Image (cartoon, grey):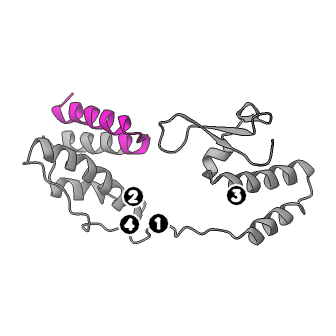
Amino acid sequence: MSALHDSLAEYLAVRRALGYKLEGTERLLGQFLDYLDANGADQITVEHALTWATLPGRGQHWHAMRLGAVRGFARYLHEIDPRVEVPAADLLPDKSGRAVPYLYTDEQILALMQAAGTLRIAHKTATFQTLFGVLAATGMRIGEALALDRADFDADAGTLTVRNAKFGPPPVWTTRLGCCS
């Protein structure tokens, strides 16, 4: 295992201690280090990072994402070793950007729930109406809501326990629901 692989393990440990999950990033950086090993390189350079990031693949967004993973790792290493080159943020910009958040009005949420009521299967109707209501009432992310289990709801206390939130710690949080007491 090269010194870069050791540094990668340290980098991932530090980032995970801050609450990041990094499964995809770990895989990408492992592939990048394999690329460096195959090319006899023991140092991160902008040239190597750019060449690896733009290998034939899925297109511009994929290339920008790959380079972004290397950029974060290179920035971490640059603090330890100033010889490590950090690719510029605008080198492969991701033009797709993030989706603009949209907050639904109470009327729009009710319309969604009413539309879910037109589904032919009663179980699906109840599931979607409940999902939309939980999302609107709590502000949870969709992944958090989909991971809920019956045991996470305490009707007596009027609480909902959320596990595996996006940023990890705290691993569990509870929200007080105003509808159940």
Magenta span contains residue 2: yes
| Residue 41 in sight in this render | no
Can you identify the residue that label 2 sits on? 57
Magenta stretch bounds: 1-27
Q: Residue at x 29, y 66 (%)?
A: 92
Q: What amino acid type is highlighted by mark number 1?
A: Arg
Do tag 3 and tag 1 residues touch (Cβ < 8 Å)? Answer: no
Q: Which residue, as the protein is rendered here, is positioned at the far front?
A: 181
Q: Earlier in the sequence, mark 1 or mark 4?
A: 4
Q: Is residue 172 left or right of residue 43?
A: right
Q: Is residue 17 left or right of residue 43?
A: right
Q: Earlier in the sequence, mark 3 or mark 1?
A: 1
Q: CA distance from mark 3 to mark 2?
A: 38 Å
Q: Main secondary structure of the magenta part?
A: helix
Q: Residue at x 70, y 70 (%)?
A: 105
Considering depth in this image, is 129 or 59 the residue closer to the camera?
Answer: 129
Q: What amino acid type is highlighted by mark number 3?
A: Ala
Q: CA distance from mark 2 to mark 4?
A: 9 Å
Where is residue 19 shown, x and y percent of the image?
41, 39
Q: CA distance from mark 3 to mark 1?
A: 21 Å
Q: Which mark is residue 136?
A: 3
In what quadrant of the picture does the C terminus appear? top right
Can you identify the residue that label 4 sits on? 60
Q: What amino acid type is highlighted by mark number 2?
A: Gly
Q: CA distance from mark 4 to mark 3?
A: 34 Å
Magenta span contains residue 142: no
Q: CA distance from mark 1 to mark 2?
A: 21 Å
Foreground label between 1 and 4:
1
